[in-house]
């Protein structure tokens, strides 16, 4: 798994890097087939009073690319919201991949096969 953490208009400190890595452990624990993670942290200075913190993640899974964005007044709150959204999407993808509720045709009784035809 490749992890890239970058900042736009922001210096990525070791504390922020450790915080993001500790939060991403939850994602990897739920779904271990992650190929690459790219995290982009941004600070937008709109006005002096209003500063917007944005966290964005691009997660590459086998056969799928997941992109999630989150905005908040605090960077840590934006990261928390981002991880919650990402966790829901990864769990949804995992359920789709592992959904084997259907029965194979060879295991169906003869009466159901004739009714389906």
Image (tube, rainbow, N blue to C red):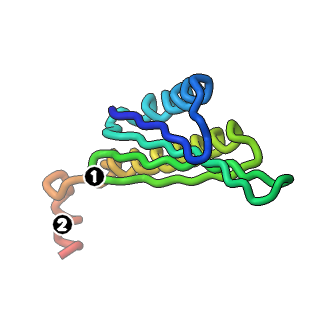
Residue 14 occupies which quadrant of the picture?
Answer: top right
Query: How far apart are labels 1 and 2 at the CA level?
Result: 33 Å
Work out whether 29 lies above or below 62. above
User: Which residue appears at 33% of the width and 45% of the height?
Assistant: 61
Question: Quarter holding the N terminus?
Answer: top left
Mark 1 is surrounded, within 10 Å at the Cα level, by few (under 14), some (14 to 19) or many (20 or more) other residues, namely few
Q: Is residue 38 left or right of residue 61?
A: right
Q: Residue 103 in the image: state x and y as whole percent.
A: 25, 53
**Label 1 secondary element:** loop
Residue, disc 2: 113
Q: Residue 87 in the image: state x and y as whole percent.
A: 52, 42
**Label 2 secondary element:** helix
- Of 86 and 37, the residue lying toward us: 37
Q: Is residue 38 left or right of residue 68?
A: left
- The residue sitting at the left extreme is 106
Residue, disc 1: 63
* Comes first in the chain, label 1 or label 2: 1
User: Which residue appears at 18% of the width and 51% of the height?
Assistant: 107
Q: Is residue 52 left or right of residue 50?
A: left
């Amino acid at each position: 798994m490749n992890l890239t953490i970058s900042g736009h208009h922001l210096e990525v400190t070791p504390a922020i890097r450790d915080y993001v890595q500790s939060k991403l452990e939850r994602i990897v624990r739920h779904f271990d087939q992650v190929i690459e993670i790219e995290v982009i942290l941004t600070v937008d200075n709109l006005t002096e009073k209003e500063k917007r913190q944005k966290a964005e993640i691009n997660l590459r899974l086998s056969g799928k690319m997941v992109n999630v964005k989150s905005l908040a007044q605090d960077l840590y709150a934006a990261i928390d919201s981002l991880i919650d959204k990402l966790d829901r999407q990864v769990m949804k993808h995992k359920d789709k991949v592992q959904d084997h509720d259907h029965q194979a045709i060879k295991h169906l009784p003869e009466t159901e096969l004739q009714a389906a035809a």
